[in-house]
Amino acid sequence: MSNSGQDPMHWGQPAPDFLRGLAEIQSDQARTRKLPPVDKWNPPFCGDLDMRIATDGTWFYLGTPIGRPALVRLFSTILRREGDGKYVLVTPVEKVGLVVEDAPFIAVRVDAVGSGREQVLNFMTNVGDQVTAGAEHPLRVALRGTEREPRPYLHVRGGLEARIARPVFYELVNMAEERATVSGRELGVWSGGTFFSLGSPDP
């Protein structure tokens, strides 16, 4: 799918149906303040956009950062991950593909309430989502590269994750407790009655 212009809100052709659906979603959100039910929509796939979400969470269109936070927020609410792992933007009438380099969101803040098993961790993402870690929104830590660098993630919704920013991860490590496991020791945090491992304290 080819596009002209740098501002997605001013695409004329070839995506009028997509823009019409996007405008309707924007109107509905302004009225109801609810996320659109993208999991229930099954429109035809209409090709890929030259759009990507970089590792640092920046959204690009035609190689240029999208500078309007409200527009990024709108796009984030219609993002869906398909069963094959691909990412699409979905409206009731059309869906289009995009590239996500890592996770689509970044967790930029965490607030802890309570302590121990009663602790609750409330996260804020770079696009304004508020997520409480727990059984339905688990934390996980992946090890990347030959250096086995820990890269933590939080499930936001529908298979979409937020990579936890490094300063936020350091906060989690500082509040973590240590416990013994069959294979050694691990650090972890409680939230919503679930213990999430952050990895081993041993080098």
Image (spheres, helix red, strand yellow):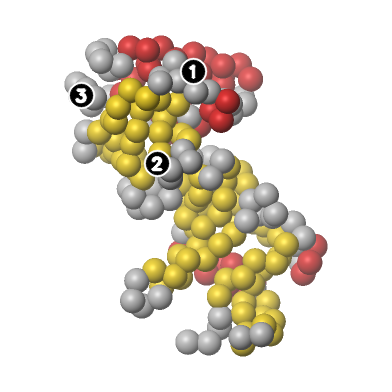
Amino acid on which disc 3 is placed = Ser
Residue at (41% x, 73% y) in the render: 149
Location of residue 73 with respect to 177 vertically, above or below = above
The residue tagged 2 is 86
**Residue 92 bears which disc, if any?**
1
Q: How much space separates mark 2 and mark 3, taking CA atoms?
A: 20 Å
Which quadrant of the view contains residue 58? top left
Contact, mark 1 vs mark 3 (Cβ under 8 Å): no
Q: Residue furthest right?
A: 118
For this view, does 140 lie left or right of residue 15?
right
Which sits in the foreground, 174 or 87?
87
Residue to which mark 3 is pinned:
2
Q: Position of residue 36 (x, y in %)?
A: 56, 25
Quarter containing the N terminus: top left
The secondary element bearing badge 3 is classed as: loop
Give, as a three-letter code, the residue at label 2: Lys
Asked if residue 29 lies left or right of residue 104, the reply is right
The vertical placement of 179 against 117, above or below, is below
Q: Tell which circle, 2 or 3, labels the residue nearer the N-terminal end.
A: 3
Q: Quadrant of residue 71?
A: top left
| Vertical placement of residue 158 versus 170, above or below | above
Instruction: Give the amino acid at mark 1.
Output: Pro
Residue at 43% from the left image edge and 43% from the top image edge: 84
| Residue 120 seen anywhere in this rendered image of the structure | no
Upstream in sequence: badge 1 or badge 2:
2
Quarter residue 53 falls in: top left
